Image (tube, rainbow, N blue to C red):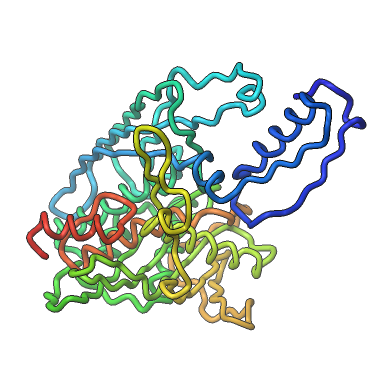
Amino acid sequence: MLGIPANMIRVIWYEGSSSYGGGQQLQAVEQAASLSQKIGKPVRIQWMRWDQHGWDSYGPSHMYDVKAAINSSGKIVGMDWTSFGQPAGNIDTHLELLGTATWPSLPGAGNGGPTPSDSAVYNVPARRVLAKSQPVYSGSLKTSALRAPNAPQSYFASEQIADELAHAANMDPIAFRRQNIDGTTTLGSRWLSVLDAATIAAGWKAKVANSVAQTGDVRKGRGFGFGTFASTQVGLVADVEVNIKTGKIVAKHVTIAQNNGITVNLEGVTTQMSGAMIQGLSRCLYEQATWNKERVTSLDWVSYPILRFKDTPTVTLVNVHPGKYTVVKPGDESQDVMAGNTAAFDNGWALSGSGEPPQVAITGAIANAFFDATGVRIRQAPMNPATVRQVLKDAGVA
């Protein structure tokens, strides 16, 4: 960027608060270097909280229009996906400083939902996927994946569709999923392994969702969600409470089963499983950028709230690997407590990623648990109290 030899550059770095990914780090470095070169003196750049929140990259928006059909036996016979997505809108920061930066003139197509390229979960004989883009004008908000690019958005849609189909068939959501997965394939066996591991560990009791009427302000629900990223499969059970007066959703317990093939460092993998889910839950329930016609207005942790310790669920972690499940307990990170008793495990399971997958599954599981508690579908995230109250009001529940 500077056009000078590396041995003529000295950088003094001071670590700030942690974040996933690059955040504003590259921008601060490039700004300091560019300004230092221009004025011929050392420069210190320090981004404050309002700088980071007000000029950083934001998670791209996605919208899905999905049609699906089942036969009289509850088998999926067709799906038609149309997605509307935003491209990554990061501009080259040092070109911005030089005044020659350009924004993408044509956005990339949005993610089209769980297609074969996304390690498709369900056996769907007839499938159409159409990905459309949203126009992005010069000077728009910068967008970039917060974690697991595009996947949390698409599985928020797909796992609610699966639950809606199960409800239409008057079936337990787990039984419905099991009969629509091809367990004779390696991929199908991996999906079934996390389905069974999560539901066994959570003590899932089969029933049709929202088949038990509830009264009172606080209602309880349980939901399941699949998710995948980096070729790793996740099955997740979420137990929630919904206050229909305040609109607040609280996740009380989350059970995560993850199949990342052969696990080398169990403690590291399970730490990532928990952390990814917690970050995904925060995005699911709280995180939302706001802006007016001039600038971003969510400039601190009040106007951009995140999940707090008091609302963080207890977690059960299950690592699935060839031939067995491992339930991870505090202080005992390697105790095998149950043998695999589901689909045939394929000895060809390979190592796959574990830094992001549980974030993909949590939002669908929370939305399905919300339906189990209230009988109402919530199709927009974050599921913050204002959104929940409006959804319940529109449905005549509150």
Question: What percent of the width, then of the height, locates residue 147?
Answer: 52, 48
Q: Residue 57's x, y, as percent?
A: 51, 39
- Residue at the location (63% across, 77% down)? 333
**Lateral position of residue 31 relative to residue 374, left or right:** right
Residue located farthest toward the left when viewing the structure as drawn: 396
Residue, x 76% and y 32% (percent of image)?
33
The image quadrant where one finds the C terminus is bottom left
Of the 4 image quadrants, the one containing the N terminus is: top right
Q: Return the residue found at the far right.
A: 7
Camera-side residue of 147 and 29: 29
In front here: 259 or 48? 48
Camera-nearest residue between 291 and 397? 291
Q: Position of residue 329 (x, y in %)?
A: 56, 80
Q: Quadrant of residue 321?
A: bottom right
Q: Is residue 359 above or below residue 29?
A: below
Q: Quadrant of residue 176?
A: bottom left
Q: Residue at x 45, y 45 (%)?
A: 119
Task: Report the side of 374 relative to 352 (left or right).
Answer: left
User: Residue 180: image x %, image y %?
Assistant: 30, 53
In the image, 70: left or right of 142? Answer: left
Q: Is residue 221 above or below residue 191?
A: below
- In the rendered image of this protein, does residue 185 appear above or below residue 225? above
